[in-house]
Image: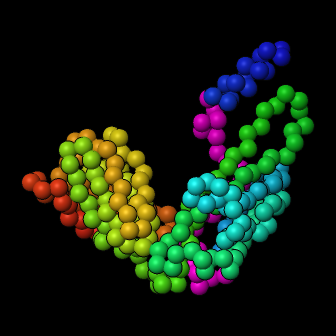
Amino acid sequence: MKHALITKGLLCLFGVCGIAHATVSPDKTRIVFNASDKSVSVRLTNQSKTEPYLAQSWIEDINGKKTRDFISPLPPMMRIEPGEQAQVRLMGQPTLAQLPQDRETLFYYNMREIPPKPQEKNVMQIAMQSRMKLFWRPKAIVLKEGQLLPLEKVALSRTATELTLNNPTPYHMTVGYLGTNGKTLMPGAESIMVAPFSKASEKLKNLPAQFQIGFISDYGGLEMMKVSCNSVQTTCQSTPEKKG
């Protein structure tokens, strides 16, 4: 019997866990923290109808190191009752003034759910963790309400095996889609983020002269661009994809 329980546990660990869903979920997929705001909130929802969960929050820097030097989550630990919501406030510290004022600084907000102790014995629990990008945006580059990221300024070029993005803006630009029909990703295409005033490349074979690229907006949606590349040179021209 004990052997059977262990076998079931391993099957869960290597099989089912790949499609497991978090019980406590945030209301965002990315966070923009403007310098004009003292804090920004993340709403957490406990989707369990019967069990309370704990939610632990912390901030990491770009290297994945935990830090409270610039932004602190309050409270760092909270109990969320079944089916209820709670808010974590990410509080800016005076030390934010030490960060570059001409570009975004990238952090990561992490939230780990902690399930209640099971009543039954020999039950393996899985604590899910959410990790999302947190962009601190200084006053000089705060966007107005409804204003989009300057996606058109990102220069694209391609070769037979590579796509290069040159980002001359002070914002992080993240590609969430590469393809030709707006639905299916091209073989080998992956999400790629280009830091402010930087370049990034992705290896891609058989990239056609015309394709679509989708940048992730501040609200987590895709802003699609139609791309046409010169058949002789490596340069490409991009225009916003018409909606509707």
Up/down of 144 relative to 26, above or below? below
Residue at left offset 37%, top offset 63%: 198
Q: Which quadrant holds residue 2?
A: top right
Q: Is residue 136 magenta?
A: no
Q: Which quadrant holds residue 230?
A: bottom left
Q: Nearer the viewer, residue 32 or 141?
A: 141
What segment is highlighted magenta in the picture? 15-39
Rendered location of residue 60, percent (x, y): 64, 59
Q: Which quadrant holds residue 187?
A: top left
If the image is split into quadrants, where does the C terminus sit?
Answer: bottom left
Residue at left offset 22%, top offset 52%: 158
Residue at left offset 63%, top offset 28%: 14
Rendered location of residue 137, percent (x, y): 53, 76
Can the viewer see residue 33 in this picture? Answer: yes
Q: Residue furthest left?
A: 232
Rendered location of residue 202, percent (x, y): 34, 48
Q: Nearer the viewer, residue 104 or 4?
A: 104
Is residue 165 shown left or right of residue 35?
A: left
